[in-house]
Amino acid sequence: DALGIDLITGARCLQDLLDLDSKALKVSEERLQEVECKVSLVNQSFADLDIVLKDLKLDGFDKILFDLGWSSNQFEDPSRGFSFNHEGPLHMSLRDDLSKVAFTAHDIVNTWEKSSLIDILQGYGEERYAWKISEAIAAHREEKIIETTTELAEIISQAVPKKYRNGKIHPATKSFQALRIAVNNEMEVLKEGLEKAFNHLHQNGKMLVISFHSTEDRIVKHYFRKLKDEGRAQLFNKKPLTATEEELSENRRSRSAKLRIITKI
């Protein structure tokens, strides 16, 4: 799940799962009941990987898998505000306790400067109509606070050209993605997590990362290339591995998944 990782140390048959989403960990706990290995579930961000390893009394690991995807359960829970398909509050945080969150999507759309909105929508969502959408949001909040996911989705839909509004994907898709990334600080957490993971990876150990959109993949690609250029790692695959036609027929959501792998020298 989002911000989730698996650590595997073969010698001890130990598998540790880190996830900032406590609900996702409960699902994992049920699914892993029959696993023979010792499993530890940790409700923490992988940016805190070094702290987690210390708490688990581990010096490192042989393999690590970053799964940067989001589960359908997270989007289908209206109370979390991730989806424009369900009416809910504009939270968009993985944390259950919002008092630990620096800001929510509600804060961003209702209080941030228009220029900051444009930067978020362009930088994290690669939204071509970021300026028009930000203009519409700024105008709307002058009349009324934007409270719900469906309200925001409607503002976005009305702001973009009709052709874009009736395209293959919902016109609010990229904007919601961008807001979610900003709220959870996903890109900075990813950068920090990758570095800490590599530092604790044993020699000849492997790091695998599954990303689902171009911004994430670009960060992983550049970091892996940097490690290769410094002579610290070998690329397992020069180009990311993607889903086969067979897998796509069974799971359409895998169409955007990219897998990159490196081996520590």
Image (spheres, helix red, strand yellow):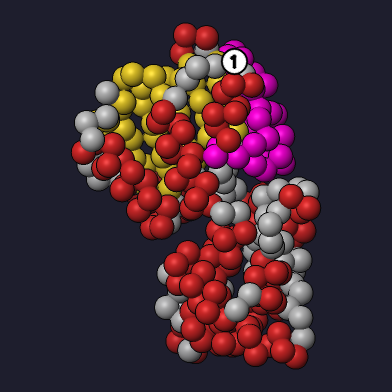
Locate residue 14, reporting x and y percent. Answer: 55, 16
Dot 1 corresponds to which residue?
Answer: 57
Side of 63 where 20 appears, left or right: right
Give the answer, above or below, for where 6 lies relative to 202.
below
Question: Which of the 4 image quarters holds residue 53?
Answer: top right
Question: Which of the 4 image quarters holds residue 75?
Answer: bottom right
Quadrant position of the N terminus in the picture: top right
Side of 50 where 232 appears, left or right: left
Total numbered labels: 1
Side of 182 where 151 appears, left or right: right
Residue range highlighted in magenta: 20-47
Side of 40 where 251 appears, left or right: left
Could you tell me which residue is drawn at 45 percent across and 45 percent down?
A: 191
Give the answer, above or below, for where 8 lies relative to 197.
above
Disc 1 element: loop
Give the answer, above or below, for where 224 lies relative to 174.
above
Locate residue 178, reporting x and y percent. Answer: 53, 65
Give the answer, above or below, for where 211 lies relative to 4.
below
Quadrant position of the C terminus in the picture: top left
- Note whether residue 44 is visible: yes
